[in-house]
Amino acid sequence: MESGPVVLVSTHHGERDNIMTISWTMVLDFTPKFAITTGEWNYSFAALRENKECVIAIPTVDMLNKVVGIGMCSGADTDKFAKFKLTPIPGKVVKPPLIKECLANIECKVVDIVKTHNIVVLEAVAAYIDTERKEKRTVHAVGDGTFIVDGRRIDRRDMMAAKIPKGV
Amino acid sequence: MESGPVVLVSTHHGERDNIMTISWTMVLDFTPKFAITTGEWNYSFAALRENKECVIAIPTVDMLNKVVGIGMCSGADTDKFAKFKLTPIPGKVVKPPLIKECLANIECKVVDIVKTHNIVVLEAVAAYIDTERKEKRTVHAVGDGTFIVDGRRIDRRDMMAAKIPKGV
């Protein structure tokens, strides 16, 4: 089953920044909370557990090869910002860097780690979107090595007016 | 931020079947586990807590008006299968029915409810896909009343060969 969009997660541990690729994000009701899934097997997990911060960076379809490449190597022996020619930019609140080339960046604090299910609950503390970028299509991992690119947009705002939070 | 595909969740409580629309699903690593978000405010929550079963049914773009309509009314006063002309079919394992008109149906057991974060962890026990259906495009909720339809598919199976679980 296809899940949420493929995102990059930037972390900071010791003196190093790192990036991982995940396709498992979930929005928790209408608050600025997210959940991602990762665990002990992942090199970035120690950074999330100790620094308790990360940046969720949303890449677009033109970055797919970098995104897949990032997911195929480990921060244990690779400087992924250098290898994939991505530009770290300091965030306002958290230590892990934003990724300049991405469409959007969300600075997050780790609110909780639900160990039994490897769920990391995040709260967004700052968010940025590159409005000048032409390519805005994100990709979704199917789970078998193929990806679905965003297609057209359908508007049902009228039907949903009663349930859409104000300000969205 | 856009999340996973919009899905229907069928539940059973007392003698009644019900359906809700959610767009928040997350795949937990490579096991047949899912997480969805819902809580006390939702009529289906009591069914999930007590019956501890549900069916995740994946609708396609041609069903979008029904999907939005299901999300805009409550099972407390509406028989949603009747109102939206959807056909319940008995599952093999769980009590809540499959939804015949959907592209795919996944029978699930509730493994855990993480109350602090309103996360319901599910384990898939049976899954079905309608292979004869022509329309296979799912939709993703942006969160502002608009929806993105699946676009084209990109294949990166070669790049990811080392990480794809066998049998996928």
Image: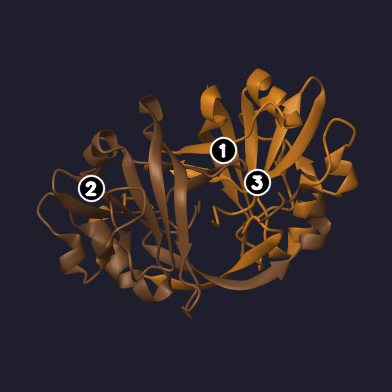
Chain colours: A brown, B orange
User: Which residue is label 3 attached to?
Assistant: B57
- Mark 1 to mark 2 CA distance (whole Å): 29 Å
User: Which residue is label 1 attached to?
Assistant: B36
**Mark 3 or mark 1: which comes first in sequence?**
1
| Residue B122 visible, this angle | yes
At a point 36% along the width and 33% down the height, the residue shown is A118
Query: Do pointers 2 and 3 mark residues of a single chain?
Result: no
Q: Position of residue A165 (x, y in %)?
A: 71, 49
Q: Quadrant of residue B39?
A: top right
> What amino acid type should be assigned to the residue bearing mark 2?
His
User: Which residue is label 2 attached to?
Assistant: A12
At a point 40% along the width and 46% down the height, the residue shown is A108
Q: Position of residue A156 (x, y in %)?
A: 77, 62
Query: Compared with residue B26, is residue A75 higher up or lower down, i.e. above or below?
Result: below
Query: Compared with residue A79, is residue A27 higher up or lower down, i.e. above or below?
Result: above
Which of the numbered marks, if any, corresponds to residue A14? none
- Mark 2 to mark 3 CA distance (whole Å): 39 Å
Q: Position of residue A70 (x, y in %)?
A: 25, 61
In the orientation shown, which residue stands out farthest toward the front? Answer: A92
Query: Compared with residue B151, is residue A88 higher up or lower down, i.e. above or below?
Result: above
Q: Is residue B24 left or right of residue A101?
A: right
In the orientation shown, which residue stands out farthest toward the left? Answer: A77
At a point 71% along the width and 59% down the height, the residue shown is B145
